[in-house]
Image (spheres, grey):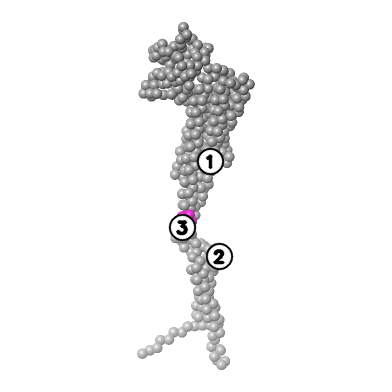
Amino acid sequence: MSNLFSRVSTSGAYATTLNNIQSTQVSLSQLQAQISSGKSISQPSDNPNGAAIAESTNSSLIQLSASQGAVQQQLGAMTQAESTLGSVVSALQQFRQLAIQAGSGSNTASDQASIANQMQQLRNQILGYANTTNSASGQALFGGQGSTKTPFVDNGSGVTYNGVGGQTNSTATSVPMTLNGQQIFMNVPSGNGVFQITAGAANTGTAFSDAGTITNPSALTGNSYSIQFTVAGGNTTYNVVNSTTGATVLSNQAYTQTTGQTISFDGMSMVVQGTPANGDTLSVAPSSTNNLFNTLDAAISNVKNNTGAALSQGLAQSLAEIDTGLNQVEAGQGLAGTYMNQANAITTAQDLNSTQLQTTQSNAQDANMVQVISQYQNESTSFQAALQSYAEIQKLSLFNYISG
């Protein structure tokens, strides 16, 4: 039986103890860095997988932040557009009230001039609203898909649209920053939207019609008609002639109710009132594409220059067109509101996504402070013990025993 003895040199003990001290110092330094920064990763080599996750989520957060900023700009644009169209609606309603006031029949020439002046001011306001630019980017809110800053140009003979018609659609992550001004302001059909009624230029009586209604859509022909009045022997009659085909639709019909008589033919109906003179006519034609500014200009000109039946007939048509224009503007306002709701929904989803990404990033790189502090305390205790051990080893020397 033999005894095995191992001999450890003093230098070997020194080296082992120093390595332990240095290793503990490195560990303590890393733990101190984690405690001060709150991060478990100071360099990729600390945790390659966690570092990769943290870097990936950080890139996603940067992209998401840019997208969030863009959506906020889009929301701001649609909020401004919705508010601006609300101002247009208010101005049109005021304009409409002035038109009704102009047709009261009790105004003096001075009153009519004053009303026309107020209508002109409102018309100019509406044109200004239509050319409103984004307060942040300077882009025209109603330029459609174009980039011009002045989409609506008043060239003296009318207003033209210099934008690019069409509406950019929203996506899952964005909404448009402009609305289709051509659709909102320039596509207003004349008359009641199906047909329009005008008084003959040579009329001398007081007869005029309302804007008319559709009674039977399937009977509409799309042709033009002429209502021709004849006054003879104290009796008033009218014929309705299809101007497109030359055929007589109604013949020798009695006109007796000057306070409002309904005339109906080919799916259309209108209420005529007033007293026609012999030979007076009313023309009925299919609606054409008009624009809101032409409608307003025509109403202003009518108030300025016409009286009696001509004024009444012109105002009847203008009021119908203004109502159609109001519908168009309100539809645009509703679309802006829809885009605002979509932008808010996108923002909510982005905020949730941002929170999830931040959680993922935190889990990958943030230090568990309770665990780190506990580990630091343990390492600190080990470090103190190692230092004391090293101090004791330093005292070991054969000469200490020889001298004894």
Residue 102: image location, x then y, percent? 57, 23
* First in residue order: circle 1 vs circle 3: 1
Q: Amino acid at mark 3?
A: Thr
Q: Is residue 150 above or below residue 391?
A: above
Three-letter residue code for mark 2: Ser
Q: CA distance from mark 3 to mark 2?
A: 21 Å
Whether residue 294 appears in magenta in the rendering, the answer is: no
Residue shown at 46% from the left, 55% from the top: 356
Q: Name the quarter where the C terminus is drawn.
A: bottom right
As drawn, the label of residue 360 is 3
Q: CA distance from mark 2 to mark 1?
A: 45 Å
In the image, is residue 355 above or below residue 205?
below
User: Which percent across, then down, holds residue 135?
Assistant: 58, 40
* Disc 2 secondary structure class: helix
Q: Residues within 10 Å of mark 2 (few under 14, many from 20)?
A: few
Dot in front, 1 or 3? 1
Cβ atoms at labels 3 and 2 below 8 Å apart:
no
Question: Looking at numbered disc 1 in the image, what kind of residue is underneath it?
Answer: Thr
Judged from this view, the residue extending furthest toward the bottom is 404
The residue lying toward the viewer, choosing from 1 and 153, is: 153
Range of the magenta residues? 355-359
Q: Which residue is mark 2?
A: 36
Q: Earlier in the sequence, mark 3 or mark 2?
A: 2
Residue nearest the observer in this picture, 2 or 115: 115
Residue, x 54% and y 83% (percent of image)? 392
Category of crowding for the residue at label 1, using alpha-carbon neighbours closer than 10 angstroms: few (below 14), some (14–19), many (at least 20): some
Disc 1 and disc 3: Cα gap in Å? 34 Å
Residue underneath mark 1: 79
Which residue is located at x 53 percent, y 28 percent? 161
Nearer the observer, 342 or 30: 342
State the image quarter where residue 106 is shown: top right
